[in-house]
Image (tube, rainbow, N blue to C red):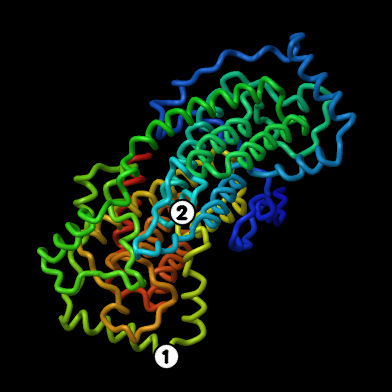
């Protein structure tokens, strides 16, 4: 029987200048082994067989008995700190690292203040501790971070599962009556190599690059996860060492991709920004987007649309780019403007609540993080194995990363004004500093709901309803026209279909 507990431990692990949203995760016991997961398609590797491990020492060997004896001796003198560590890392390591990533995004989702001369500083990966601290974890950056973390975790666990069921060496607590099982574990799941060690190693390697100011904290978490599994009798020293070996090999591949994905050019420069606006005007936009901040702030990551995609190439991205929004001054445009103004004047409590719930602005873990939270609670409720949980997060975050890239490409192509630029009397719940068409929330949500509907078919309608609410929330908040949202939803669905075609 599944056991579900509430936990918000990660809030205590990261100190930040703003409050991290107090969400909870679920701990649970998986209900399936997924013995065939080692044959699943990978993202960064050619196949799981790219990383074959040597056979482990037999459970009857002298070397393995020494590993067992070390655990037995330590379990006889566990300290309160040891017991707390075991308790902390009970449950899904995949979900826990997802929560770590979300907390980091929320901590760094802070746009820098203007310089005295009216320009804005840019965070520097070369000097991450200087103001503004690197990174500014806005929605595009967050989507990319979640994608790298979870594609790498997924690949590592596919290899781990292939090796587990190739060698079939069980856990120390199974192989020796002297070792106590200090936390629940799956009967029938081999322990060589350790899935927790692989996940912990991937996570510390990837997140330390994405959030370099927090490397020491991440190293502490990673070491703690491995130590907890050793103390609890789930993994021997060699199980952990081989899990780390897989994690390092996959992290190397993922980081190689990360360092060459064109993110370094995503900010752009004044010449690039001017050319983008001029291109939209040349295509017929008579009212291009302008920053409503004082002083005017350049568009957030204006060149993010050219970051390397996960499931398609640039030509396919262009083929998914929607047609233009309603022309300024057209009957359709006026109708949508009047809708936003009418809602602004008479917004009811339910609309206000929906707008606030989905605002996902500064100091939050962004719209992609919101969908990761939805995925995490669903994974726990369904009792997925670690490798299947990793697959859900992998496909979800690939789709949302591609959604961010495609959305930014569309935003730059049309450079469409937001409602409050057309009519400054409109009050907004926040105001993102980039063009309106299409809606990022809507595109993220269309992509996420489509992926989760495939992974959890019985919940497909629920995810679609959630996506529709997230989309319309941006109209309720005065931030988008209806066309921005409806077209964004459809684009997200199409992007998710590209991801599904790529991964299956």
In the foreground, 292 or 65: 292
Residue 49 on image: x %, y %: 46, 21
Rendered image: mark on residue 346: 1
Number of numbered discs visible in the structure rendering: 2
In which quadrant of the rendered image does the C terminus lie? top left
**Residue 420 visible to an observer of this rendering:** yes
| Residue located at (14% from left, 60% from top) | 279
Helix, strand or loop under label 1? helix
Residue 471 on image: x %, y %: 39, 69
Left or right of residue 345, residue 378 in this image:
right
| Residue located at (26% from left, 80% from top) | 422
Residue 341 on image: x %, y %: 33, 86
**Residue 31 visible to an observer of this rendering:** no
| Residue located at (33% from left, 35% from top) | 260
Residue 60 on image: x %, y %: 75, 11
Q: Which residue in the structure is indicated by mark 2?
A: 137
Rendered image: mark on residue 16: none
In the displayed structure, 9 sits above or below 490; it is above
In the displayed structure, 174 sits above or below 352; it is above
Helix, strand or loop under label 2? loop
Q: How crowded is mark 2: few (under 14 residues within 10 Å), some or many (20 or more)?
A: many
In the foreground, 445 or 260: 260
């Amino acid at each position: 029987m599944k056991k579900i507990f509430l936990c918000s431990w990660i809030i205590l692990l990261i100190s930040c200048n703003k409050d991290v949203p107090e969400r909870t995760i679920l701990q649970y016991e998986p209900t399936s082994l997924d013995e065939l997961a080692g044959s699943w398609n990978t993202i960064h590797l050619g196949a799981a067989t790219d990383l074959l491990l040597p056979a482990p020492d037999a459970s009857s060997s002298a070397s393995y008995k020494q590993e067992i004896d070390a655990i037995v001796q330590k379990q006889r003198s566990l300290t309160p700190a040891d017991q707390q560590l075991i308790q902390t890392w009970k449950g899904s390591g995949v979900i826990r690292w997802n929560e770590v990533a979300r907390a980091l995004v929320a901590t760094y989702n802070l746009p820098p203040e203007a310089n005295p001369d009216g320009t804005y500083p840019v965070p520097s990966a070369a000097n991450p501790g200087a103001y503004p601290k690197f990174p500014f974890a806005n929605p595009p950056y967050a989507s990319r971070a979640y994608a790298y973390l979870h594609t790498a975790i997924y690949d590592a666990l596919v290899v781990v599962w292939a090796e587990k069921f190739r060698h079939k060496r069980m856990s120390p607590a199974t192989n020796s009556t002297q070792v106590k099982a200090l936390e629940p574990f799956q009967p029938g799941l081999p322990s060589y190599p350790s899935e927790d060690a692989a996940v912990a190693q991937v996570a510390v390697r990837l997140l330390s690059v994405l959030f370099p100011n927090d490397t020491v904290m991440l190293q502490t978490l990673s070491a703690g996860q491995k130590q907890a599994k050793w103390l609890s009798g789930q993994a021997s020293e060699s199980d952990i060492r081989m899990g780390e070996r897989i994690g390092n090999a996959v992290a190397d591949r993922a980081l190689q991709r990360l360092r060459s994905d064109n993110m370094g050019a995503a900010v752009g420069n004044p010449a690039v920004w001017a050319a983008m606006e001029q291109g939209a005007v040349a295509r017929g936009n008579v009212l291009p987007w302008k920053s409503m901040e004082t002083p005017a702030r350049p568009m957030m990551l204006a060149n993010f649309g050219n970051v390397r995609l996960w499931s398609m190439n640039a030509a396919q991205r262009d083929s998914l780019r929607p047609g233009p929004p309603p022309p300024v001054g057209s009957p359709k445009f006026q109708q949508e403007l009047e809708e936003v103004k009418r809602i602004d004047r008479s917004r009811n409590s339910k609309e206000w609540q929906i707008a606030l719930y989905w605002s996902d602005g500064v100091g939050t873990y962004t719209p992609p993080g919101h969908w990761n939270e939805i995925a995490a609670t669903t994974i726990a409720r369904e009792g997925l194995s670690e490798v299947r949980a990793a697959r859900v997060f992998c496909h979800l975050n690939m789709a949302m990363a591609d959604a961010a890239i495609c959305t930014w490409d569309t935003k730059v192509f049309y450079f469409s004004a937001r409602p409050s630029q057309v009519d400054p009397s409109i009050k907004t719940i926040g105001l993102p500093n980039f063009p309106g068409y299409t809606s990022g929330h809507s595109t993220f949500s269309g992509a996420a709901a489509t992926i989760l509907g495939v992974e959890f078919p019985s919940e497909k309608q629920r995810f679609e309803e959630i996506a529709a609410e997230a989309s319309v929330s941006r109209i309720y908040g005065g931030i988008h026209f209806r066309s921005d949202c409806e077209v964004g939803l459809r684009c997200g669905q199409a992007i998710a279909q590209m991801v599904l075609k790529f991964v299956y």
